[in-house]
Image (cartoon, rainbow, N blue to C red):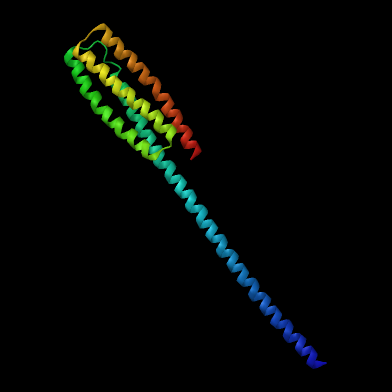
Amino acid sequence: MSDNALLVAGLTGITAIAASSLASWLTSRGNAHAARVQVSATTEAQRRESLRQTRRAAYLELIDWAHAVADGLRGVDGLSAAEYEAALAAHRERHQHLRRAVTLIGLEGPSSVDVAASHLLIMSGMLGTALAAAAENVSRDNRREFQDALRAYIRLIRPVVDAAAAALNEA
């Protein structure tokens, strides 16, 4: 009987050790898997936040230049021909900054913001054309055409802001 008791005690001990080792091994595998999942989730969250911040900076730059173009042209009506030339040179400079900002938006996306920004850039070019016409011939028709283009340009800023806000909310 003591041999059987010793055998049972030995088997019980071996079983306990094996069960403990198996449980420890399973726990460590589970912990390692949980750690990998956590690292993956953290990395993805950091990537999304980095993308969001990069887009936000690009959108803010675009919006700043869009307003700079509009603000630089608000007082243009009623200038002399020489003053129109100076205003045209300043507009061309701001237009180039706007073009770079729109190009950056094309890289950052999404396409809804890119399309709205492209419309704004096209209208900024049309503003330059209308301003050049007014500089060549300061007539009432040319000034009215310029003012119409400026109002159309200003109306296009809001869709850019709305598309940028929507894109940031999705990111």
The residue that appears at 33% across and 22% down in the rendered structure is 123
- In the shown orientation, is residue 86 left or right of residue 68? left
The residue that appears at 73% across and 84% down in the rendered structure is 11
How many circles with numbers are drawn on the protein? 0
Which quarter of the picture shows residue 117? top left
Q: Quadrant of the N terminus?
A: bottom right
Q: Is residue 34 above or below residue 76?
A: below
Q: Is residue 147 above or below residue 58?
A: above
Query: Where is residue 45 shown, x and y percent of the image?
Result: 49, 49
For the residue pair 43 and 100, the one nearer the viewer reads as: 100
Q: Is residue 55 above or below residue 16?
A: above
Query: Where is residue 61 shown, x and y percent of the image?
Result: 35, 34
For the residue pair 125 and 153, the one nearer the viewer reads as: 125
For the residue pair 133 and 88, the one nearer the viewer reads as: 133
- In the shown orientation, is residue 92 left or right of residue 46? left
The residue that appears at 40% across and 39% down in the rendered structure is 55
Which quarter of the picture shows residue 151? top left
For the residue pair 160 and 6, the one nearer the viewer reads as: 160
Identity of the residue furthest to the left in this view: 82
Identity of the residue furthest to the top in this view: 140
Query: Where is residue 129 shown, x and y percent of the image?
Result: 26, 19
Which quarter of the picture shows residue 27? bottom right
Query: Where is residue 116 shown, x and y percent of the image?
Result: 40, 28
